[in-house]
C-alpha cells in the first residue's frame, strides 16, 4: 500500500524536500472531496445561522450576516484549528479522519503545519481555545443585543488580525519557502487566509465607529447633566 511505504520511508509531498516526517501516511481523500466537504459544511452553518437570525425581526441584514460570519469562523477555529493544535501527529493518521485529511492537504501550501512549527502551533492553539468560543459568544451577543457585542467583536477581530499577521510575518522571516508549488502557495496560503484579513478589518472599523459614537453620546449626556446642576 502507498500509505505503508510512506510510513516506512517517511516520503511526503511537502517543501522543503528534506523535511523529516517519519511515519508519514499520504492522504486518502482527494482535494475536491476535502474542499467540497468544507464548502458544504460551511454553507450549512451559514444557512442555519441565517434562518435562526431571521426569527428576530429587529435584526438588520448586516447583523444577520455578522452572526453567520461568527458562527462559521467560531466553528472553524474550534473544530479544525482545535484538532490541529492537539493532534501533533495528524500526518500519521491512517483512518481518513477528515480533520487530519484537511491538514495533510493544507500543509502542501504551508508545511509548517506538518512540521509542527512552534509559532504556528501557538497561534492556532490560542485561536482555537480563545477566539473559537468567543466567536460563538459573539453570535449570542448580537442575537440578544447585548451591550458588550461591539467590544467583543472588536477584540476578536483584533486577535484574528494579530494572529494572521504573526502567521505571515514569521513565514516571511523564515524564507517563505513552505509551499509545494505556486498553486498551493496562492490557493491555500494566500487565498484561504484572505477572509481572516479582510473581514476582521471591516468589522474592526465598524465596531470602532460604533464604540466611539457611544462614548461621545455618553460624554455629551454627562456634560448636559453638569450644566443642569450649575
Image (cartoon, grey):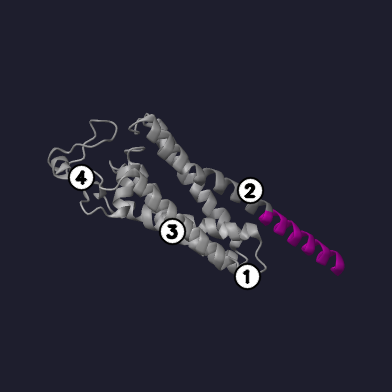
**Residue 151 seen:** no
Residue under label 1:
56
Looking at the rendering, in which quadrant would you find the C terminus?
A: bottom right
Q: Earlier in the sequence, mark 4 or mark 3?
A: 4
From the image, state whether disc 3 or disc 1 is nearer to you: 1
- Residue 177 percent location from the top left of the image: 35, 30
Q: Earlier in the sequence, mark 2 or mark 3?
A: 3
Residue under label 4:
25
At 45% across and 37% down in the image, what residue appears?
190
In space, the residues marked 2 and 3 are separated at their CA atoms by 23 Å
Residue under label 3:
75
**Residue 87 seen:** yes
- Residues at marks 4 and 3 touching, judged by CB atoms closer than 8 Å: no
Q: Is residue 201 above or below residue 146?
A: above
Magenta region's main secondary structure? helix
**The residue stretch that appears in magenta:** 210-230
Q: Earlier in the sequence, mark 2 or mark 4?
A: 4
Residue under label 2:
205
Q: Residue 135 — which label?
A: none
From the image, state whether disc 2 or disc 3 is nearer to you: 3
At 13% across and 40% down in the image, what residue appears?
5
Looking at the rendering, in which quadrant would you find the N terminus?
A: top left
- Residue 146 percent location from the top left of the image: 61, 67
Amino acid at each position: 500500500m502507498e500509505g505503508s511505504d510512506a510510513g516506512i520511508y517517511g516520503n511526503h509531498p511537502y517543501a522543503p524536500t528534506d523535511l523529516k516526517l517519519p511515519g508519514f501516511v499520504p492522504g486518502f481523500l482527494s482535494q475536491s472531496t476535502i474542499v467540497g466537504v468544507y464548502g458544504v459544511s460551511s454553507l450549512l452553518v451559514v444557512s442555519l445561522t441565517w434562518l435562526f437570525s431571521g426569527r428576530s425581526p429587529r435584526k438588520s441584514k448586516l447583523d444577520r450576516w455578522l452572526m453567520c460570519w461568527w458562527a462559521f469562523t467560531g466553528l472553524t477555529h474550534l473544530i479544525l484549528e482545535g484538532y490541529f493544535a492537539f493532534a501533533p501527529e495528524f500526518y500519521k493518521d491512517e483512518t481518513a479522519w477528515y480533520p487530519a485529511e484537511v491538514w495533510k492537504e493544507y500543509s502542501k501550501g504551508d508545511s509548517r503545519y506538518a512540521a509542527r512549527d512552534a509559532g504556528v502551533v501557538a497561534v492556532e492553539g490560542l485561536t482555537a481555545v480563545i477566539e473559537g468560543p468567543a466567536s460563538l459568544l459573539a453570535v449570542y451577543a448580537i442575537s440578544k443585543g447585548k451591550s458588550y457585542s461591539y467590544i467583543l467583536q472588536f477584540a476578536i477581530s483584533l486577535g484574528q488580525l494579530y494572529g494572521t499577521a504573526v502567521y505571515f510575518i514569521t513565514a516571511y522571516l523564515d524564507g517563505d519557502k513552505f509551499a509545494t508549488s505556486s498553486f498551493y502557495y496562492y490557493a491555500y496560503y494566500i487565498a484561504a487566509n484572505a477572509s481572516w484579513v479582510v473581514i476582521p478589518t471591516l468589522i474592526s472599523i465598524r465596531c470602532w465607529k460604533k464604540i466611539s459614537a457611544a462614548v461621545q453620546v455618553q460624554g455629551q449626556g454627562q456634560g448636559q447633566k453638569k450644566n443642569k446642576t450649575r
